[in-house]
Image: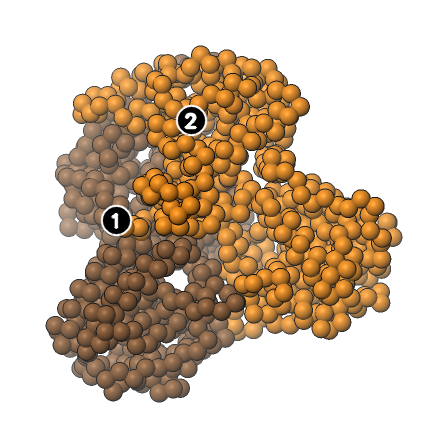
Chain colours: A brown, B orange
Amino acid sequence: MKIAVCQINPVIGDIQYNKKLILEGYSRAAASGADLAVFPEMALLGYPPLDLVEKREFREAVFSAIEAIAGLTGKTGLIFGAIAEEHDTIGTNLFNSGYLCFEGAVRFIQHKTLLPNYDVFDEMRYFESAVHNDIFEFKGEKLGISICEDIWNDKDYWKQRLYPVDPVERQIAQGAQIIINISASPYSYGKREEKRDMLSSISQKYQVPLVYVCHAGCQTDLIFDGGSFCFGNTGQLVKMGKLFQEDFFVFDTHEALPKKPITVERSFEEEVTDALVLGIRDYCVKTSFKSVLLGLSGGIDSAIVSVLAARAIGPENVYTVMLPSVYSSRGSIVDSEKLIANTGIQSLSVSIQPVFEKLLEVLTPYFGGKPADVTEENLQSRTRGLYLMALSNKHGHLLLTTGNKSEVATGYATLYGDMCGALAVIADVYKTDIYALAEYLNREGEVIPRSIITKPPSAELRYDQTDQDSLPPYDLLDRILKMYLEENMEVKEITSVVGEPETVKRILRLVDLNEFKRKQAAPALRVSYKAFGYGRRFPIVQRWSRE
Amino acid sequence: MKIAVCQINPVIGDIQYNKKLILEGYSRAAASGADLAVFPEMALLGYPPLDLVEKREFREAVFSAIEAIAGLTGKTGLIFGAIAEEHDTIGTNLFNSGYLCFEGAVRFIQHKTLLPNYDVFDEMRYFESAVHNDIFEFKGEKLGISICEDIWNDKDYWKQRLYPVDPVERQIAQGAQIIINISASPYSYGKREEKRDMLSSISQKYQVPLVYVCHAGCQTDLIFDGGSFCFGNTGQLVKMGKLFQEDFFVFDTHEALPKKPITVERSFEEEVTDALVLGIRDYCVKTSFKSVLLGLSGGIDSAIVSVLAARAIGPENVYTVMLPSVYSSRGSIVDSEKLIANTGIQSLSVSIQPVFEKLLEVLTPYFGGKPADVTEENLQSRTRGLYLMALSNKHGHLLLTTGNKSEVATGYATLYGDMCGALAVIADVYKTDIYALAEYLNREGEVIPRSIITKPPSAELRYDQTDQDSLPPYDLLDRILKMYLEENMEVKEITSVVGEPETVKRILRLVDLNEFKRKQAAPALRVSYKAFGYGRRFPIVQRWSRE
């Protein structure tokens, strides 16, 4: 069977646009002589639609679009993801479903059985589980259609499973000859390899071809990396969709293996660069912003973000502002100027000093004679935020924040200061990984000035300040943070690896105490297994004390 | 059977403190001659503990505390909520459970069966469902212990149920003679009456006494209103715990009806006042803040918040700052002074004019000759935010925000300006209800000056500005917002009630577009059925267009 894989980038809630994407892909598939065109999970709604699906009028618009799409189908089959309703007196009556249409009508609907409800997923909030998994015979082949998580529960692959049933196993038992999984599985580094291994093992185990169709695009903070997979009937990867972009290709289930094996693995730096560039671009495209703005400190974080933004929307659309104070080093200004020259981004320099001094003049009488402390440092950062927001408001640029994950974790950032912005580009990338990213971006010639990479990181909010006045060295800090955030390890467990119980306790406490800041942070593009934001849910007011 | 109802206010994650609360309540129960002391759901962890329960060391600390508590029990029984583990190869292996202890050991554990996963609830994220519901015979009575949601699924009470099984029905079928439900059900206005009706109908239907034990306190934004219920065996309400505060009392299941029927209903204004006062106080207590700070604009919102804060922690701990500009009316200043005199709160006045003018001087050259617009308005609001944050940082006051729900909904607020603060006190109260609250607070004499209540609301960010320049009249706006936010109604449905399709579309669009602001808003004390924040999850980037 010839299956057209339609790896699209829908917009959440934009049913007319997504419908157009589906119909265009379908026409192309039909014109290519494909038997079947397959689109991802929730292709018609975008994923995740969240509480939008609770609205009656929204649901009705979806159901109308499904009818319209089905009505336009011919002999070529069409599979796409959407929602479905079934009414009884128990539950939400709503399903996350795959639709199979041809010859003018919906011919078969398979609801999703396994509803992910961890990390960024909340599907049990909205949907009921399918009670049966069926197969459908189409053009002489028995298709087993499943939806994303449905295929993530193979008892031979996972030691610990989340669910008691296996929808794919059920479909195979009924004679399924081709497994089709429509997916919306957010990107994190390393996940593609795991998917490849798992899906390959299922194809091999059941000796059936397997087609796995993905989204390619970014929805606020969630990145979908494309890379749809087509496996032959013994688990060989025969085709893969383009990474981090839309794609369309036809896979023949009887197709021979490609001469060169398909490489799924790529370096962390290459992956994260592509992911973040897509994230910036899609936020702009989907919200109709034409240009972005960011503050350029002379440090590595804002340098990286400006380079990524230039790749995403062109350097002519990236507006940067240097915001020096008396504490800004001459080096920071020179370094920023080099970066601007290297990249061709737009730039401006506006001193915060006159406003900062006026603020001190006005406010100091109300400080009760208390010595200078973090208040004065925050005032500088907030003055910068205020400048940036004014320029953003006046010129309609989207403001990007430049904090990294190590800072966001420890609260080494000023609320309403450097945290101002609509999108946090690198807030899911640790500081040590930022350096690796800089080297990668410089691999074909210096883009980020060497001096930016080599100088000790500093917020430059007082004389001779460096990050390491307040924080442990970044390599130790990041090791601790990764264990705490990504492995859920605690004091005893982390200390058994890195020692330094007092440092470990202090860092974990800092992370917990700064939950209130992260509550008010911009959404952060997610590239790790566990990012701050929607997928990590900690109480703000709590006193887990670890004593 | 004599049952001591222990309506406590635990702190999330503070296992030692919560353990102390449980042991103190238990001792008091034993000393009172009670047969059984009952504490709420998750009494030992606080509710909701969220992702804390995913940590191994946290779980172990909980299990140690359970052992320690059980070891101290004597002949008096003890029931409290915590987590439990059961290991197999499927699922999370974690349960939300009720523990029954006596004579030195845990004697019985009932896991929760029905896991709420809507609005602010995410229990399917963490827990597995009980597979059986048992009863336990204690001192000659068969107890049916259930956990919160377990009792919210009676097929005779609900037309549409969320779950196919009824744990209480199962326990009754096994001969349960007393129903005990341990609960952690967040407050919203009107919910107590519904709980009373539902629980009464269950007691009446099965002809058994029913004891329903609640939390009393606030956890960040979620308020728990106490009001534990004890029903006799024909559904009569015999005892009720104090509202919005901790309580301890003994209920005899054979107790006669009180001479005066218990009134559950209270006015919206009384309820919301008590709820918000508790919310402010508990945020301060649980985070160790001794004082709060807020900007006083001369308008009704900041007036209300200052009065509520004064009730919560005493006027001597409420610091207010007037932040006038050239656009501030003389009336606003006079009104604020009256309010300060009426309430005894602390006050300060610091003009934003010099800093605002300096900002304009510095930034205007970069505005490209564009006319004054919202940029300049936001600059004023952000200068105020910056002043308030500086005073908060320097003096260690908790900064409160004063935006109401109508503003938060429509984005009539400045990000990093008046949205600065750690806790949004009235962000779940519509503007029209704010007026009702003001009248209530003035019922025994003027606290909030009459002129604050009667003048047209204005942000005073330009000359002669009023809210109604940008928004429809608040009574219409709030009707639209309530239907949209709380009933999930959409354009056609709302228009069929209020007409004005263009206004309705515009307002709904405003609400959607401003999701990015709310993402960065302070947590809002929740008093309605559907508050912004954790329980309402909308995509930030989306294009549901309603055309």
Question: What's the residue type where badge 2 is placed?
Answer: Gly
Given contact means CB atoms under 8 Å apart, are the residues at marks 1 and 2 in contact?
A: no
Residue A372 coordinates in the image, percent (x, y): 46, 21
Q: Nearer the viewer, residue A178 or A155?
A: A178
Task: Give the vertical position of A474 relative to B351 (above or below).
Answer: below
C-alpha span from label 1 to label 2: 30 Å
Q: Is residue A238 visible?
A: no
Q: Quadrant of residue B285?
A: top right
Mark 2 surroundings: few (<14), some (14-19) or many (≥20) residues within 10 A? many
Q: Residue at x 31, y 79 (%)?
A: A179
Task: Give the vertical position of A72 relative to A210 (above or below).
Answer: above
Q: Nearer the viewer, residue A184 or A22?
A: A22
Q: Is residue A8 left or right of residue B217?
A: left
Query: In the rendered image, which residue does mark 2 sit on?
Result: B385
Q: Is residue B418 left or right of residue B470?
A: right
Q: Residue at x 30, y 77 (%)?
A: A107
Numbered disc in front, either 1 or 2 = 1
Residue A268 coordinates in the image, percent (x, y): 29, 57
Q: Quadrant of the N terminus of chain B?
A: bottom right
Q: Residue at x 82, y 62 (%)?
A: B103
Query: In the rendered image, which residue does mark 1 sit on?
Result: A286
